[in-house]
Amino acid sequence: MKQLFSFKNLKYSACVVALFGVIQLLISLNIFDDYYQITIATICINIILAVSLNLIAGFTGQFSLGHAGFMSIGAYACALITLNINSNYSFFLGIFVGAILSALLGFVIGIPTLRLKGDYLAIATLGMAEIIKIIAQNLEFTGGAAGLSDIPQYTNWVWLFFFTAGTVVVIKNFINSSHGRACVSIREDEIASEVMGINTTKYKVLAFVIGAFFAGIAGALYSTYFYVINPGLFGFLKSVDILVIVVIGGMGSIRGSIIASILLAIVSTYLQDFPEIRMILYSLILVVVMLAREFIKTKKINLDILNIKKYIKTNGAR
Amino acid sequence: MPLLSVKNLTKSFGGLTAVSNANLTLNKGELVGLIGPNGAGKTTVFNLLTGVYVPSSGSIELSVGDNVRKINGLKPYNITRLGISRTFQNIRLFKDLTVLDNVRIAMHQNVKYGLISSFFRLPSYYREEQEVIKKAESLLEIFKLDTKKNELSRNLPYGEQRRLEIARALATNPSLLLLDEPAAGMNPNETAELTDLIDWIRKEFNLTILLIEHDMSLVMKICERLYVLDYGMIIAEGKPEEIKTNKRVIEAYLGEEVPHA
Amino acid sequence: MEQFVQQLINGLSLGSIYALIALGYTMVYGIVKLINFAHGDIFMVGAYVGFVSITYFNMGFFPALLIAMLFCAVLGVVIEKVAYKPLRNASRITALITAIGVSLLLEYVVMFFAKAGVRTYPENVLPNLEMTILGVRITFTQVCIFAVTIALVILLQFIVHKTRVGKAMRAVSMDKDAAQLMGINVNNTISVTFAIGSALAGAAGILVGVYYNSIDPLMGIIPGLKAFVAAVFGGIGIIPGAMIGGFSIGAVETMVSGYGSSLYKDAVAFAILILVLIVKPSGLLGKNTREKV
């Protein structure tokens, strides 16, 4: 128990609470207008999505391109519940049901992962998300292609903060537990993992279930903050967006996912000033960042080689 | 009662029979070698024993406590839990994880705290994690890796990677340890050191060991019994001295490598 | 029965187009193990190049087809050289995201120049003939699509199996390093593969334009994904597999639209994909491989 109140934990908690207080103050003093608040909400929701996808893709090594599918389940479930049940608790009920349904779907989608790897899994998850989208487009009670609107706006900064911080803490705790290490070992070497006594089937599916659970929460927050949803919001592009955050922030780095969520939100805020070429710039940035990352990586190796040469020059050749 | 008894074990891939009708018995506490020319099917035997491959026919029985369990067809992780652990010919560490984590992962099966404890760090989490770390560190100490516990395993020198793999295998708390070419790529000094280490851990951990090895200095020094595999069939079995003079064995090795003592 | 045959004929035309796109996917995946997400957009560019050639330069169908194929071949090679080549040793996910980035770039660059709206191909690119056999309607365009596809596939088979370049392609797809040691210029071989694959997609683009008349900058996404489904269905990396996959997906899709609900036709393609991946991940003609332990 001592570790719980370690200096590092206390320092982190203090910073996080201070951040919460400052932003709450700025909002209540109306210094942060709607525009900023929307950006903050986007950042929070993206953090939840990226961290939960990181658990699946970055830590467990299961390449998923369908995270927006999970998000949509949470969004629709929560929207339908808050629209149809008029009670003080409908918001929590909506979030809870959305997360659970999404986790159930994660279980279903997790099962094919038992046979699929890499690119094939990516395509299969993409296909699942597309199927969900098409179903949502064609069902009556989900509002078809037009989606749902006038969803009560329950989500505010307090709830955004609570769920974002909660997601990060819970997933980080999970990763640093024996169960989390079991997941990571699957990414590292599935066969060795199984031979070391890890039930890889169980942990792969578990990663999908937990990841989907939190993506469901993100979706629920989305629908009750932006009060309009439609199937198009949860398409392939959204899944790519989340994956991009995870990759840019670093696979298997929770801190990276958080930073990348913030960076990307800032970039897209700036890009909004150029509506005509916004997507061109976005895709260019994407390609350039990927190429640059690889360039830096290979450059580093070259630098190492230089060092070895230098080392030989000074120490070897006596 | 033998610890492991393998009867008529056969594995074929399509038309190729990698292991055919192999019979093997290991008694408790024995240190047995499995030798044979390259491609004889030695590693396949290991893969069958650990459940990585499912046997085409035959049976594998392991005594667990006072019971005898049929383990062919079980999943690898179940077999590990029943007490068989192994290393790999081409080192399969969790490369991007620390030395300590490699060992801790192998101890996962003994961890009892549940998911909820891990999400919210309930007291059981702290209690058990501390135990795990303590055990893992003491294991690393035996293998002289405790000073490197926070290094990534990919950064270890080759010989230490081999040692870590054995430490990791021991962390699953096995009764039978399978070592796949533990001395491969080591120089004579390292091999001699490893030979002593294997002998020592066998006594210390009360193990039965089956090892695949090409280095005859190691095999002849510590193995009490040898099985010789050629073309998937066991062609000889006996004490090292007997095997050395066995005509069929010499024939099998001719053109490959002649065992020298 | 008549309706069934009719749907089959329609499915065959649609399937030809999927097959042409799938061939590029399969060849590229076979050689560099990359799901080239931009491939569907090269198909879209082909449709636009065809559109420009026909409406602004008054070209006939075949010259326009050649121009579109040539343009797409060059585009494919440029994309490979600029965006994919530096990532050849990078992680799969980096390469995949780059491919998605290139895909978005193509879509929105075309959108910037050609505007987001739908463009329509002229009506009379191909003679407006049709015939009715036993109540089944076959248009000249459909015959053309089918004929062009078959001709291109025969040409491709010839290149892959009878020429030096083809031999090099097969060698590189089996083992890049070994091929290099045998004196094969791997970079050139990969470029040729991209060129051929992209040219086929370009051809598919102009065929779609002629068949459906309307094109738009985002038209490549769904056919691209479905063509990938087709490639996986037939067994990725296998040329006849891509053909079979393309025709099957085309046929299933028109059947679903014809007999069931056209709203779900896209979902069916993905459902097939997931089913195939679960039942036989290596595809119809693929061989199972196992990891060596």
Image: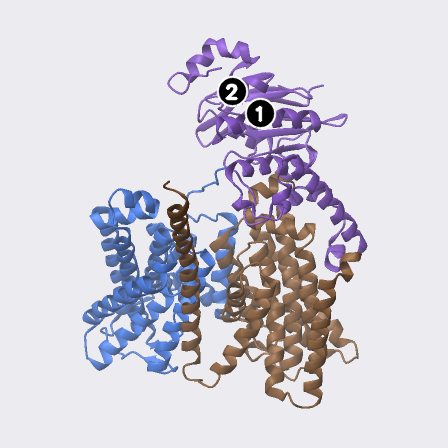
- Give coordinates of residue C54: x percent, y percent: 23, 77
Q: Colour of chain A?
A: brown
Are the numbered discs 2 and 1 placed on the same chain, yes or no?
A: yes
Q: Is residue C157 above or below residue B76?
A: below
Q: Is residue C64 visible?
A: yes
- Give coordinates of residue A92: x percent, y percent: 75, 73
Instruction: Return the mark for residue A173.
Output: none
Of helix, strand and loop, which one carries label 2? helix
Amino acid, disc 2:
Ser
Q: Colour of chain B?
A: purple
Of residues B186 and C46, the one drawn nearer to the viewer in this rendering: B186
Location of mark 1 (residue)? B195
Task: Count residues near mark 1 (Cα–Cα under 10 Å), then give few for <14, some for 14-19, many for 20+.
Answer: some
- Marks 2 and 1 in Cβ contact (< 8 Å): yes
Of residues C30 and B187, the one drawn nearer to the viewer in this rendering: B187
Distance of label 2 from label 1 (alpha carbons): 9 Å
Q: Is residue A39 above or below residue B143?
A: below
Location of mark 2 (residue)? B217
Q: Is residue B233 visible?
A: no
The N terminus of chain C: image quadrant: bottom left
